[in-house]
Amino acid sequence: MLKKILNEAHFTLRITTTGPLLIKSGRATISGPDMTPVLTFRNGRQEIFLPGSSLKGVFRSHIEKVICSLKPRVACYPFSGPEDKEADIELRRRDYRDSCSAMFTGAGHSNDTTEKVYELSCPVCRLFGSTGFIGRIAIGDAYAVTEQIKEQRDGVGIDRLTGGASSGAKFELEVVSTGVSFETDIHLRNFEIWQLGMLFVVMQDLEDELIRIGSGRSRGLGKVKAELSGPSKGIVTSAIRKNVEPANELWGLGRWLNDTSYGTRTDDLVRLSEPVTSSVQGIRSTRTFSGDTLNTLRSAAIGKFIERIEQWPSSPAPARSSAREQ
């Protein structure tokens, strides 16, 4: 599938802190705060940034919860492993499938073709990938586009007997202040329309400040707001210029393939309320969705996402072993 470019989408997302934020570096300073933000060397100095891997993890975790809420046993639990080492396995299996990664490295699937692996993957792994198949989405590191303002905060452990501060349990945090903006580039390649809708769901919840990122989320940290940025403040889609996509439609992977391979559907498209013309850039024909056309696309793609998940077959729960039944 990835040996050809069929369709692509890319956009810039601006993430602004609406509360203190901390993505920990994993080590304390020698003579400073116990917890500090992760840093990178950029523009000749050390800067705070939001790692793309962290953002991808937040996106994935959130959409797993959304899918599980729409229909149980459709999304897989990526960390499932041996039964004797997994806590609350019965509770987990009520809502989640076993790990796609574990399935494709196990007996009976180790020699599956990439087409079969994609077809059998859960909807989350189809977009974000697994050890058996690369994902459709790439999320870059988010770098600050406004002045970086940091502040220090004190934390303390609570004595369970007295209800007061526990002696010796004080710690310090260095956090990013409210009002600092970061920007990241997000790229989709060979995507299905419902996958675009899945991403729109995450972006909508970020816009509504329903997703927190980083450490200390239960202690009030990590509150952010996101919006589309860049020159168009929209989404740019593209296809190879020799291909013909009607101006009043946006095609997904299934429509481009048009043969139901990879478990796709030939009706994988969105009909637009008004035409969106394309322009030629190198080998690609590109189209920009912003304003009303973006709102129309967002609504239609989210509808496709909900419809696809509701139609997705639930994975049957594995039979219990006789040892566990005794």
Image (cartoon, rainbow, N blue to C red):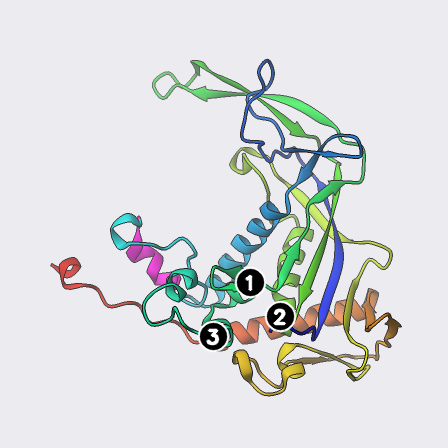
**What percent of the width, then of the height, locates residue 171?**
52, 19
Magenta region's main secondary structure? helix
Residue drawn at (71%, 73%), measured in percent from left and top?
7
**What percent of the width, then of the height, locates residue 63?**
54, 58
- The amino acid type of the residue labelled 1 equals Ile
Residue drawn at (55%, 63%), measured in percent from left and top?
134
88 drawn magenta: yes
Query: What residue range appears in magenta?
Result: 87-97
- In this rendering, the answer to whether 128 lies above or below 13 is below
Q: Are marks 1 and 2 in contact (CB under 8 Å)?
A: yes
Q: Earlier in the sequence, mark 1 or mark 3?
A: 3
**What percent of the width, then of the height, locates residue 146?**
81, 37
Classify 10 Å Cα crowding around label 1: few (below 14), some (14-19), many (20 and above): some
Query: Which mark is nearer the camera, 1 or 3?
Result: 3
Residue labelled with disc 3: 113
Residue labelled with disc 1: 134
- The amino acid type of the residue labelled 2 equals Leu
Residue labelled with disc 2: 2
- Which structural element holds mark 3? loop
Query: Which residue is farthest left?
Result: 326
Tell me the distance, in whole angstroms, between the alpha carbons under discs 2 and 3. Answer: 13 Å
Q: Earlier in the sequence, mark 1 or mark 2?
A: 2
How many numbered marks appear? 3
Classify 10 Å Cα crowding around label 3: few (below 14), some (14-19), many (20 and above): few
Residue 209 in the figure: left or right of residue 117: right
- Which structural element holds mark 2? loop
* Of the pair 40 and 147, the residue shown nearer to us: 40
